[in-house]
Image (cartoon, rainbow, N blue to C red):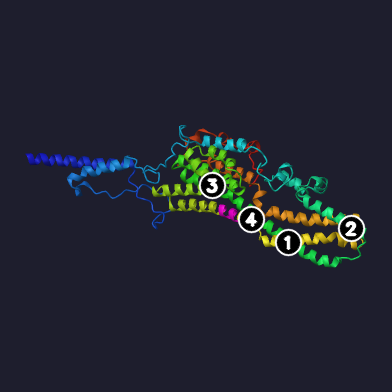
Amino acid sequence: MLFMASSIISCILLGHHVLYVHSFVQQNGGIRQRHDPFSTNDTMDRRGPRLLSIETPLSIPKQRSIHVALQASSDASESIEHPEGKNMNGEINGVEESVEGKGPDSLLQFSKDVEHVIHNLRGAEVDPTLPKMFLERPRALSFTHSWTLDDWERHNSRKRYFRYVVNFPTSRLLKRTAPQMVTLTLWSVCSTWIIDKLMIKKTIPLTSLGIISSFVAFLLTMRSNMGLARLDEGRKAWSKVVLQTREMASLISSFIYPLDKQLALMLARHVACFGWLLKSQLRSVPKEDVADIVNTMLPNKADAEYVLAQRQKPIVVVTRIRQAIHHLGKQGKLTTAEEMALDHTAHALSEVVTTTGRIRASPIPTLYTSHTTRLLTFYLFFLPPALHWSGLDRLITILVTWAVGYAMLGLDELSHLCEQPFRVMPMYQISKRSMTAVADAFTCRPPPLDGEHVDDEVKTLSQKELTIYWNKQDADVVTDDEME
């Protein structure tokens, strides 16, 4: 009887253990294996839950059967802190509550912060960090701001000849070359007066100066071409800022937002700051110029302090994105294709930082610049006497010298302006466009597909309520007149 009783009790315990393990597997969706992004057996579809091979209680001694079930339950339910600041439940420290003491982040709050930056913190139409010569006439057509269709119509108008002649006294290039032109004019007056007063008969043949002028024109043309090439390369690099931030925001919205809304919004806030961080680095403005934007877009104090404390602030965005990719990849929440797409776009953002840094750090060879300047100075120094000795009177000599000097000195000054393109580039407007593009990727979501999960905010709030950062024209006519 005692033997039969012990057998019955053993069977009851064994059956209870099997039911416990089966219930645990169903409730937790299985135990995921660690995702290997380089696995050759990976597929393009999102992986479903995978189960570890669990020994049946028949193969486990009675003394260990209950211990295995309790240990598995403990490992799955407890949150174990990771040395990298992550835990096994898939949360990154500081992401669950993006605003300390204010609860989790939301799409509406994200839109409000973007609107505050674009229309309040940076609501001015003109970039205040531009050189002074471009701030004096903010309404004038200039490369320093993004053009609209109206600007192109005005620029291509046949009235431009009259407008440019009338506005010549207020020309920015004339003001830029004013010291050189005043010096050249004074030298023209003095040299012609000395020749007439002292009756100097020696002459400088214009043919000799003509040979020198060919070399000067060639050097100035080459330098202008190099300056324009640098301006074009810098502008292409900044166009990639809008392209790559928009692509990154779209990937985060598609891949990460359905899995972890708080993590996705945290990454979106970092990506939205990328243009402003890069602008502050290229134009060498004080840290306070970007601190207000960082503190607004990154309400988590630890994130904001970390960004502002770095030497290369735009790289922080890339680092944060790759940290999230690694975190989700370890959990098996991203497929290999999704990881590669995110990492490729993060690499493109890093490449933009490197390209713009190379342009700013490497000028046109200074030996070329100094040789051109010396030869130009030599030519303009001997031009007034040569013209006066050729038979031109004093007034005509001064006027011709002034016109030639303005043409050559103006071309030289233009090449210097283009050589450092980030002083005149519309980075202010491009940063706004980049931030708007990032926000649009989250707030302007397409209609859901069949069976697709829809966020509660997207269900309850309309697109108009989520896009409060749009300007009045974009909201009224639903168009984009200021392209990137």
The vertical placement of 285 against 197, above or below, is: above
Amino acid under disc 3:
Lys
- Spatial CA distance of label 2 from label 3 is 60 Å
Q: Which numbered circle lies on residue 249?
A: none
Tag 2 and tag 4, C-beta contact below 8 Å: no
User: Would you name the residue on which mark 1 appears?
Assistant: 372
* Residue 482 appears in the rendering: yes
Q: Residue at x 75, y 56 (%)?
A: 411
- Spatial CA distance of label 1 from label 3 is 37 Å
* Pointer 4 local density, CA inside 10 Å: few below 14, some 14–19, many at least 20: some
Q: Residue 141: x, y in percent?
A: 73, 45
Is label 2 or label 3 in front? 2
Is label 2 or label 4 in front? 2
Amino acid under disc 2:
Ile
Q: Which residues are magenta?
A: 352-359
* Pointer 1 local density, CA inside 10 Å: few below 14, some 14–19, many at least 20: many
- Spatial CA distance of label 1 from label 2 is 28 Å
Sequence order check: which comes first, mark 4 or mark 3?
4
Sequence order check: which comes first, mark 1 or mark 2?
2
Sequence order check: which comes first, mark 1 or mark 3?
3
Q: Is residue 401 left or right of residue 72?
A: right
User: Would you name the residue on which mark 2 appears?
Assistant: 194
Residue 480 lies in what quarter of the image? top right
- How many marks can you see? 4
Q: Residue 31: x, y in percent?
A: 33, 46
Sequence order check: which comes first, mark 2 or mark 4?
2
